[in-house]
Image (cartoon, rainbow, N blue to C red):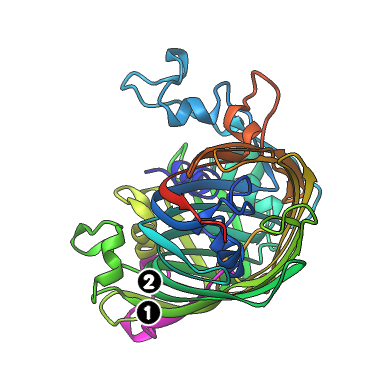
Amino acid sequence: MSLRLLSFNLLCCCFFISSVTAQNFLGVSPSPYGGTQSLYLNPAFAADSKYGFYLNIGAGNAHLNNDYFRYQAPYSLMSLVLKRVPGPYRLSDGAVLFRPEYLGESGNGKPKSATAWTDLRGPSLLVRLGQGAAIGLTTRLRATAQVNNASEALLSVVRAGLEDQRFYNLPNRDNRFTANTNTYAELGLTLAGAIVQNDDQQLSIGITVKRLQGITAGYFKNSGLSYRVLSDSVQSGQYYLQVDELNAELGYTTYLQDRGRSVTLRQLFDGNNPGRGWGADIGISYQLKSADDPNNYALRLGIALLDIGAIRYRDDRYVHQYSIDAANRRFEATDFGQVSGSEGIANVVTNRLGLTDANNSGRFTSGLPTALSINADLAIGRGLYLTGTLLQDVRPKDAIAIRQPSLISVTPRLETSALGVAVPLTIINNSFVAGASIRLGPVFLGTDNLFGMIGSNSNKLRPRGADIYAGLAIASLQRKP
C-alpha cells in the first residue's frame, strides 16, 4: 500500500466509513410513538409513550458529516451503498473507482472536524406501568470514528495524496488535532415516572443506567506535529513523509486483530473485552395537556443530559498507550505495504517511532459523547406537530472522547398511531440538511440528510455528509383510562 493510498484510505475512514456517537433519528425519536428510540433523546419520554408495550426487534443508523469536504463523485452514495455504480466508474476487477477529486474542498481557514458512526439497536423492550410510569431495557452496539480540530493544510495533503508536488518541501506546523475511535456494546435499564400528573399537566423524570463493554478503541492527541512531504532524491518517482517533530499521545487496542474477532452484540457478555465502563442519561419532561383531550399534549418540553460516563480500557494483552516525543522520523511507502485496518496502521506507526513495551502504560480512558438535549414539541392541530431539537456537545475539543456533533433541528410532523411523516430541517457542522421519514405503526424508515443520500456532482447537490436509519418493532397502544 502506497502512502498516497494509505492517506486516502484514512480520509475515507473520516468521511465514508459507517462507524456511532449520537442518538439522532430526528424523524422518529421526538415522537410519542417512537418507543425505545425516544429514550435515547430523553429517558423521561418513556413515561410519555403512547405504547403500553413496545418491543424493538432491530434498528440501525449510519451517519457521517464533516465541515470541509463535499462529496462530488459522478454517482450518489445511495448508488454506492446499493452497489449500482455505473460501469464507466468501475475498475476491471469490478471495484468502484474513487478519485481524490471526488471530494471537493471548502475552506475558510478554520479547524475542521469529521464524524462517522453506526448505531445498531438490538432487542429492546419498553413497558408502561399504568398511567404514570414506565420501564425499559435496551441493547445497543455503537461504533464511531472522529477527527476534531484538524487544519485545512493537513487535510489537503491527505486528500490529494503525498505524490502531489504542490505540497513538496512545504513545512507544516499548524496540525494540533485529535482523532478518536470507539466501538462498544451497551446494556441499558430505563426507569421513568410522573411526579406531577393531572388533567392539565404532567411532569416526568427518567434515568437510564448503562453497562458498557468496550470492544476496541483508539485515539491520537497531537500537541505538536511538524512535517514535510519530500521526493526521494535516490529513487526516482518515490516519496516519503518526513516528520521533523512530533509531540503526542497515542492509544489503541488490538483485541479485534487478535484471533480475527468480529463485532457483535455478543460482546455484551464477553468477559475478554478490553474495556469496561458505566454510563447514564438523565432527563425531565413537561407536558401541557390539550384542553380538548387530556390524553394528548398541546406542548411538551424536555431537557436531558445524555451519555454521562466513560470506558476504561485496561488489559496488558490488548491495550497500548504511549506518550510520544520524537524527531526526524521518516515514513516510507513500503512501511504500509501489507497493512489492513486501523490496528495494523497503529502498529506500523509505533514501530517506526521506536515505541516499545517499556513505553506502554497499557491503559487509557475514552469518554462517551456527553451532550445536552433540549426538545420542544408543539401540537398545531389535526395530527400536525412542530418539533424543535437542540443537541449540544459539552466535551472539550481536545478530549480523549467521542463527541456529539452539535445540531439544531426543526421538524414538521404528521402524526397518528398508524402513520407518521416527518421532515427534519437541520443545521449541523455549519451546513443545512433536510431529511424525511415515514412510520407505519412501529416500523420506520428515514434519513436526517436526504441530500447526502442522493447528492452527486451530476445533480450539483455535493453534500458534506449522509444519514439513513430504519427500524422494525412490535407494539400495542396503551389503553385509555
Tell me which amino acid carries mark 2. Gly
- Compared to 440, does 115 lie above or below? below
Identify the mark nearer the N-term, 1 or 2. 2
Extreme-front residue of the structure: 481
Residue with the mark numbered 2: 214
- Residue visible at 68% across and 57% down in the picture: 171
Q: Tell me residue 40's x, y (percent).
A: 55, 62
Q: Residues within 10 Å of mark 1 (few under 14, many from 20)?
A: some
Tell me if residue 366 is in the magenta stretch: yes
Tell me which amino acid carries mark 1. Arg
Secondary-structure class at tag 1: strand
**Pick the front one: 204 or 366:** 204
Q: Tell me residue 313's x, y (percent).
A: 39, 79
- Residue visible at 35% across and 57% down in the picture: 123
Tell me if residue 417 is in the magenta stretch: no
- Compared to 227, does 252 lie above or below? below
Horizontally, is 437 left or right of 319 in the view?
right
Horizontally, is 67 left or right of 481 in the view?
right
Secondary-structure class at tag 2: strand
Disc 1 to disc 2: CB gap under 8 Å:
yes
Q: Tell me residue 271's x, y (percent).
A: 24, 76
Using the rendered image of the protein, determine whether residue 184 is visible from the camera's viewpoint: yes
Which quadrant of the figure has residue 447? top right
Residue with the mark numbered 1: 276
Q: Which residues are magenta?
A: 351-369
Horizontally, is 244 left or right of 476 in the view?
right
Q: Where does the C terminus fall, quadrant-wise?
A: bottom right
Using the rendered image of the protein, determine whether residue 255 is visible from the camera's viewpoint: no
Q: Tell me residue 405's x, y (percent).
A: 66, 58
Which quadrant of the figure has residue 381? top right
Could you say which disc has been placed on residue 411 in the image?
A: none
